[in-house]
Amino acid sequence: RVLEKLNWEKKYHYVRIGPGKAIGFGMVDRKPVFCLPGGPPSNHISFLQLALPGLLRLAGWETPELPRATVELTEEIQGQIDWTQFLHGRLIKGDDIVKFAPSEFKSRLQMMATSQAIVKIPEGIASIPAGTLVKAHLLN
């Protein structure tokens, strides 16, 4: 409502990612406005995957994304077939390759604070088997 009063030019609101699907983006007086969702994991993922790359691109960066590395999954990971799913996890040094272990889900804030990487499960894929090599976005 507030943005509508400011003549917000909505580009999108709600995307098919989880967590973070309630993100919005638009322009107010030719200035970019990102509306991040409220829950900490949703806010974190939507900022890292959409808002930060958008801001970096506007600032002139040629490759506005988090650093990535190829990792091996320690276990099967499951997503939602109807949207792209992002999973927090930790990295484990392996013999030949770094491994990705999904974070335990005891506390969402603790999970986010201890995560070292994020793995994406693309829309249309229900699961990815253990041992698969995937790209991980590095957080630290």
Image (tube, grey):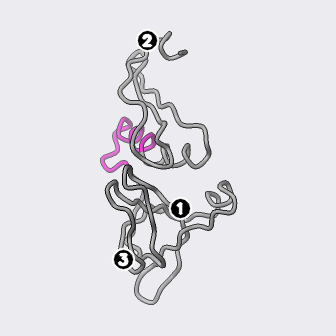
Q: Residues within 10 Å of mark 3 (few under 14, many from 20)?
A: some
Dividing the image into 4 quarters, which one contains the C terminus?
bottom right
Q: Earlier in the sequence, mark 3 or mark 1?
A: 1
SS for dot 1: strand
- x and y percentages locating residue 26 in the rendered image: 40, 25
Q: Which mark is residue 11?
A: none
Q: Residue under circle 3?
A: 132
Residue displayed at 36% across by 35% down: 58
Q: Is residue 6 above or below residue 111?
A: above
- x and y percentages locating residue 97 in the rendered image: 41, 82
Q: Which residues are magenta?
A: 50-65
Tell me the mark number nearer the camera, choosing from 2 and 3: 3
Q: CA distance from mark 2 to mark 3?
A: 47 Å
Q: Amino acid at mark 3?
A: Thr
Q: CA distance from mark 2 to mark 1?
A: 36 Å
Residue displayed at 48% across by 48% down: 48
Q: Residues within 10 Å of mark 1 (few under 14, many from 20)?
A: many
Q: Residue under circle 1?
A: 88
Residue displayed at 48% across by 73% down: 100
SS for dot 2: loop
Q: Is residue 19 above or below residue 116?
A: above
Residue displayed at 44% across by 75% down: 73
- x and y percentages locating residue 71 in the rendered image: 41, 74
Q: Marks 1 and 3: in contact by CB < 8 Å?
A: no
Q: Residue under circle 2?
A: 7
